[in-house]
Amino acid sequence: MSCSSTSRSPGWADLPSEIVVSIAKSLVVAEVIRLRAVCSSWAWALGKSSGLRQNGLYNPFPWILLPNYSLEDADFCTFFSITEDRFYRIPSLKQFTDHRYHLLSSSHHGWLVTIDNVLAPCFLNPLTREMFHLPTLLTIPSRCSIFHSALGASYNKRMFYDQYLRKIILISTPLEERIAVAFCRTHYHGICMLFAGVEDEVWSIGPSLPLDLKCSLDDAKYNEGDDKLYALTSSGDVFVLQFKNHTLEIVSMVCRPIGYEHYHMFLGYISFSHGDLLLVNKYLRSYPSYNNAIKDTAFKIFRLDRVSCWAPVDDLGNEALFIGPNNCFALHDVEERKKNKIFFIHGVPIPKHLCFERK
């Protein structure tokens, strides 16, 4: 008696899992999502959403979340890909469409931060559909004097995240620890720093700024290169924080640039370019004769050099800076029409944008 067997030629679905992972490591997250949808064997090799990070598939993708003018009636989110010059619509999450949720800010690697009607922050990634929750901000210790006593019973939660809560940023490395830092404005225009992990039940108070440094927060940015958080004050100083030994510490301070014109009305932003810290000031001017309309008049860029001195930047070269209310980033080797430009992508109706070119 003889037996026969059938054989087939190997196809793309039989590609070894280590090769699939190796290919995916050179792709941005959006492309990895598409790759995982090709067949079940590739999806298995790349794992679930969390597996993207476990396998090191974590390249950032320069997308901008656009305003939703349909409000709760829309069932999608619209993103603009800067490098592709195209729009993407993806099915929305309830954190975008439910009026109980308020989009607060963004963090690195595509994480968005929302806050609900009990002041509980939620980190979510609209592409991978991952999300995790942090304890409600109602657990802030009472000794953290955030609220103005004159508000009394008139205080409400909307006032808190509109006027007092400045930023929440994910700082943990590795990401499985998921530690976040919150910056709040105190009633005397100072800065209160808080931190919490995904398994914590309450927020803990972070370090205090020096007594002679009474100012508010302009911007904050986490740098994966040195695993530190950089925070820019309204006075132009930058303090550097790091999460060590289960607590948040100020590890260094960077003084404002020499001749820093802090008496001007301006907005300050920070970003990183090739590992260097950039400081961007956008100067504003009020026009009383036009109902106190505020116009952008000029901007300055500084780069922190290797000896911790600020150097003026007159040319961005092949780079472009994108400055937004929640996040700022630099793109390298962009197309010719975007080189040596700064794009301010907030406060301007879509699809218009405001662009300054270095001369």
Image (spheres, helix red, strand yellow):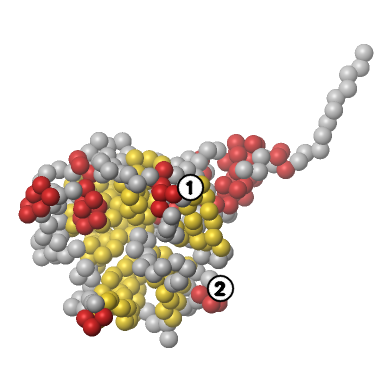
- Picture layout, residue 224 above or below residue 198: below
- Residue under numbered circle 1: 75
- Residue under numbered circle 2: 335
Residue visible at 54% across and 60% down in the picture:
87
Displayed quadrant of residue 43 = top right
Would you say 227 lies left or right of 29 here?
Answer: left
For badge 2, the amino acid type reads: Glu
Q: Disc 1 or disc 2, which is closer to the eye?
A: 1
- Picture layout, residue 198 above or below residue 206: above
Would you say 280 lies left or right of 317 here?
Answer: left
Q: Residue furthest bottom?
A: 359
The residue closer to the viewer here, 54 or 40, is 40
Q: CA distance from mark 1 to mark 2?
A: 33 Å
Residue visible at 24% across and 56% down in the picture:
162
- Picture layout, residue 242 above or below residue 189: above
Residue visible at 12% across and 50% down in the picture:
154
> Residue 228 location, x and y as percent?
32, 56
Quarter of the image with the N terminus in it: top right
Residue visible at 31% across and 36% down in the picture:
199
Quarter of the image with the C terminus in it: bottom left
For badge 1, the amino acid type reads: Asp
Taking the image as drawn, is residue 3 in sight? Answer: yes
- Disc 2 secondary structure class: loop
Would you say 52 lies left or right of 231 here?
Answer: right
Would you say 241 lies left or right of 24 here?
Answer: left
> Residue 314 location, x and y as percent?
39, 82
- Picture layout, residue 225 above or below residue 313: above
> Residue 336 location, x and y as percent?
55, 77
Q: Earlier in the sequence, mark 1 or mark 2?
A: 1
Displayed quadrant of residue 267 = bottom left
Q: Residue furthest top?
A: 1
